[in-house]
Image (tube, rainbow, N blue to C red):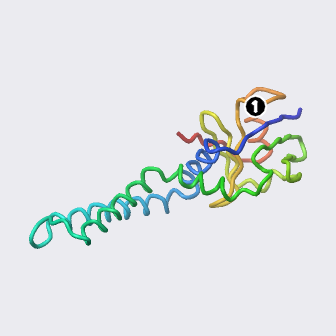
């Protein structure tokens, strides 16, 4: 039985991929980065208000506030920013992918070309409410839109992929 997906690599799918990577293979590093980032925000705010002489509006304070805002925005919108960056790095002609999963491996077609993949190259499997994500490394993955699945049910596809890869899907919120 063959399964077919048609996925558009848009902002939503790339944000999902960034979130899944952050919550799986980058989990430890991400936790450290977030703790450090929020510590720096608190430290900078504390320095502005509790420094000798109290709060005063100066060029140094404005620069510190801009840094606090930049760090806060980055921490809150990290997945969207990483998804945007990833999407901008995609070569032209790969924004829409058609992928066919068969017994021997899977075949992806984009406007730029075609490629064949073996199931043993998948490092980890993840799923979200709308997507399946194949993780290959700390910074590489592929997303498949669940709504576009043809050739079987979502449960049949999951069972098929878990059997082929020897790995289980992890659900990521």
170 to the left or right of 108:
left
Numbered disc total: 1
Q: Residue at 76% of width from left, 26% of height from top?
A: 153
Q: Residue farthest to the left?
A: 53
Residue 85 in the image: above or below residue 53: above
Q: Nearer the viewer, residue 91 or 38?
A: 91
Residue 163 in picture, x, y percent from top left: 78, 41
In the current view of this chain or complex, which residue is farthest to the top? 153
**Residue 27 rendering spot, x and y as whole percentages:** 51, 56
Q: Residue at x 38, y 62 (%)?
A: 37
Q: Nearer the viewer, residue 115 or 52?
A: 52
Q: Residue at x 9, y 71 (%)?
A: 53
| 168, 30: nearer the viewer | 30
Residue 157, image quadrant: top right
Residue 72, picture quadrant = bottom left
- Relative side of 65 to 48, left or right: right
For residue 36, above or below residue 10: below
Residue 75's image quarter? bottom left
Q: Residue at x 63, y 48 (%)?
A: 14
Question: In terms of secondary structure, where does tag 1 sit?
Answer: helix
- Looking at the image, residue 14 sits to the left or right of residue 68; the answer is right
Tell me if mark 1 has few (under 14), some (14-19) or many (20+) residues whose alpha carbon lies within 10 angstroms of its own: few
Residue 109 picture location, percent across and down: 86, 46
Where residue 118 appears, as percent x and y from the top left, is 84, 53
Provide the residue designation for mark 1.
148
- Position of residue 39 relative to residue 153, above or below, is below
Split into 4 quadrants, where in the image is the N terminus? top right
């Amino acid at each position: 039985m063959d399964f077919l997906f048609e996925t558009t690599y848009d902002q939503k799918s790339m944000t999902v991929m960034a979130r899944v990577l952050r919550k799986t293979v980058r989990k430890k590093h991400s936790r450290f980065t977030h703790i450090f980032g929020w510590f720096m925000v608190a430290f900078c705010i504390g320095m502005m208000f509790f420094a000798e002489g109290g709060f005063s509006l100066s060029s140094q304070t404005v620069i510190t506030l801009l840094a606090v805002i930049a760090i806060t925005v980055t921490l809150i919108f990290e997945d969207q920013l990483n998804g945007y960056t990833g999407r901008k790095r995609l070569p032209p002609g790969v924004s829409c992918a058609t992928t066919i999963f068969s017994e021997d491996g899977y075949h992806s077609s984009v406007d730029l070309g075609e490629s064949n993949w073996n199931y043993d190259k998948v490092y980890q499997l993840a799923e979200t409410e709308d997507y399946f994500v194949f993780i290959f490394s700390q910074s590489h993955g592929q997303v498949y839109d669940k709504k576009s699945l043809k050739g079987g049910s979502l449960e049949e596809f999951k069972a098929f992929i878990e059997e082929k890869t020897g790995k289980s899907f992890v659900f990521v919120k």
